[in-house]
Image: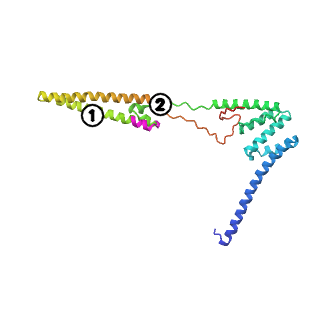
Amino acid sequence: MKIHYKYFFPLIFILVIGMSAGAAAAGGQEESGSDLVRQLIDAYNRFDYQKSSELLSIAFQHMDKFPPADQKDIYQYAAFIAFQNGNSTLAENHFWHLLEIDPTYTPDPVTTAPKLLTLFQKTKIEFLEDMNQRLQKIRVPEQKRDIPWRGILLPGWEQWHRGYRSRAAVFIGAAAISAGGFVYSAIQAHNKKSSYEEAATPGAAASFYDDYNQYYRQQYYFGYAFAAVWALSQIDLSVWSHPDATLRLQAAGAQYTRFSPGLSLKIKF
C-alpha cells in the first residue's frame, strides 16, 4: 500500500501526538500512585486510621504498579495500622514483605512505639534466620575429582586444560627438552657403543668409549630431568593449579520470598 506524500506529515503528527499522550498518561499514573502514598502517610499522621485503611485497600489492589520505594511505604504503614488495630500477626506479615524489598530497613526508633519496634526486631531476626537457612540449602555441586590423565601423559597438558597457560608452557617445554635429550642421548650412546665395539685400534676404541660413556650418562641425566618435571607437574596439579569452580547467583532485581532460595545478608541493627 502506498501513502501519498501529502498524507505523510499528518500521519507523523498524529503518531507523535499519540505517543505524547501515552507518555503523559503513564506519567500521570505514576504521579497518582505517589499521590496515593502521600495521602496515606498524611492520613496516618493525622490519626485518621479509617481513611488510611481505605487508601491501603486501594494500594494493595495495584501493588505491582508502584515502585519499590512506594511499596516500602505502603507495607510500613500497613504494618503500623495493623498493629494499631491489635493484629500483630498481620503487622508482622507486612514487615516481612517490607524486608523482602529492603532487608536493611529499620523503623525510626524515636517515632516508633516501643512495642511496635520490638515486634519489628523479632520479625527481622526471623527473616534473617530464614534467609540463612535458605542459603545453607544452596551448595555448589560437588565436582567429580577426575583423574588428571593429561598430566600423567604429558607434564603441563592438564595445566593447559585448566587454564594455567604460562605454567603449562614451562612444563611442556621442560618435558620436551628433557625427553628429546634423552632420546638423542640414547641413540648416540647406541651408535657410539657400536663404533667402540667395532674399533680397529686401541686409540680409536678409547675415543669411541669416551663418547659412548658421555652419551650413556647424558641419557640418564635427561631421564632424571624428565622424571623431575613430571613429579613437579603432579605436585603443581595437586597444590596450586586447581580447576576453577564458581557459583553464580542472579541477585540483581531478585525478589526474596519466604519459601524460595535467596541470599544471606548479615545486617546489624
Label 2: which residue? 240
Amino acid type, callout 2:
Trp
Q: Position of residue 148 (x, y in %)?
A: 44, 31
* Residue 141 found in image quarter: top right
Whichever of labels 1 and 2 marks the residue nearer the N terminus, that label is 1
Q: Is residue 163 magenta?
A: yes
Q: Is residue 140 magenta?
A: no
Label 1: which residue? 184
> Residue lying farthest left?
201
Relative depth, front residue between 76 and 18 = 76
Q: Residue at x 31, y 35 (%)?
A: 180
Tell me the crowding category of disc 2: few under 14, some 14 to 19, or many 20 or more residues within 10 angstroms, Cα based: few
Q: Depth-wise, is mark 1 or mark 2 nearer the camera? A: 2
Amino acid type, callout 1:
Tyr
Q: Secondary structure at mark 1?
A: helix
Q: Residue at x 32, y 33 (%)?
A: 179
Kindly identify which numbered label has been placed on residue 221.
none
Q: Which residues are magenta?
A: 162-170
Q: Position of residue 245 (x, y in %)?
A: 53, 34
Q: Position of residue 78 (x, y in %)?
A: 81, 39
Tell me if I can see residue 147 in this picture: no
Q: Quadrant of the N terminus?
A: bottom right
Q: Residue at x 36, y 34 (%)?
A: 174
* Residue 184 found in image quarter: top left
Give the overall secondary structure of the magenta segment. helix
Is 196 left, or right, of 123 in this rendering? left
Is 30 left, or right, of 246 in this rendering? right
